[in-house]
Amino acid sequence: MIVLAIDTCEARGSVAILKDNAMLQAVPHAVSEEYSSWLLPAVDSALEFTRTTLREVDLFAAASGPGSFTGVRIGLTTVKAWSEVFSKPIVAVSRLEAVAAQSQSTAHYVASFIDAQRDQIFGALYHRVEGGSALVEQEMVTSPEVFVEWVDERASGNEVAWISTDPDSLAKHPAWQPRAAREDKIQCVPCVLAPFIGKMAFQRALNGNVMNALSVDANYVRRSYVEVFQKGPVRVPGK
């Protein structure tokens, strides 16, 4: 199965081509160019390197968020168009889940987070189940302090593995210092997530968990500036 995976949810996005579970090529978004002009040439470059065409792709995978509104929309709109044109399925994968899936810990819980800017983080808590992991409540955007408190409450004293593309967004916050004092660690993983999104999409496709263009939806987590101004601030856990 040839999988084309893209992540355009933030500036550190990427494109990847996989054959089954093996990555063939990855192209990181290492420039300041907007995704509207960068994405398609990057895909063309990856396809050319692997001597593959869009028509030969069996599965399209995309990061569904969380991230910027424009970035998420560009990625999902692109794979929806390909799905319609080539009649191929889609799998949408949360970036937080793609981060959590890389945890090397055997802890029962995995707390995954990414820097959301504005002194906030995107965060989620997963608990391990047979064959994978399950999301505990909903993904969120909140302050580092509130996220740590929320995770502690939900984990109820069980061991938690912490993992992130941006460990300093929590590790340098006062809320982490009690954990640092007892030598708790945050596993750092690469910000190039398209290869992991592609691997997760492949496994889901094997289990028949695919979507069409109409059923794919974004998970922004954070409301747009327009919504904030119209509806007031977002409520966060513990507030």
Image: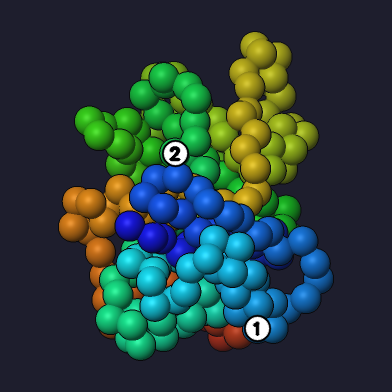
Mark 2 / mark 1, whichever is N-terminal: 1
Res. 36 mark: 1
Quarter residue 145 falls in: top right
Identified at 60% across, 79% down, the residue is 40
> Which residue is nearer to you in this view: 20 or 36?
20
Badges 2 and 1: C-beta atoms under 8 Å apart? no
Q: CA distance from mark 2 to mark 1?
A: 29 Å
Q: Residue furthest left?
A: 208
Q: Position of residue 56 (x, y in %)?
A: 38, 71
User: What element does badge 1 sit on?
Assistant: helix
The amino acid on which the numbered mark 1 sits, given as a three-letter code, is Ser
Q: Position of residue 77 (x, y in %)?
A: 46, 82
Quadrant location, the N terminus: bottom left
Res. 101 mark: 2
Residue 160 lies, with reference to residue 120, above or below; the image says: above
Identified at 66% across, 13% down, the residue is 183
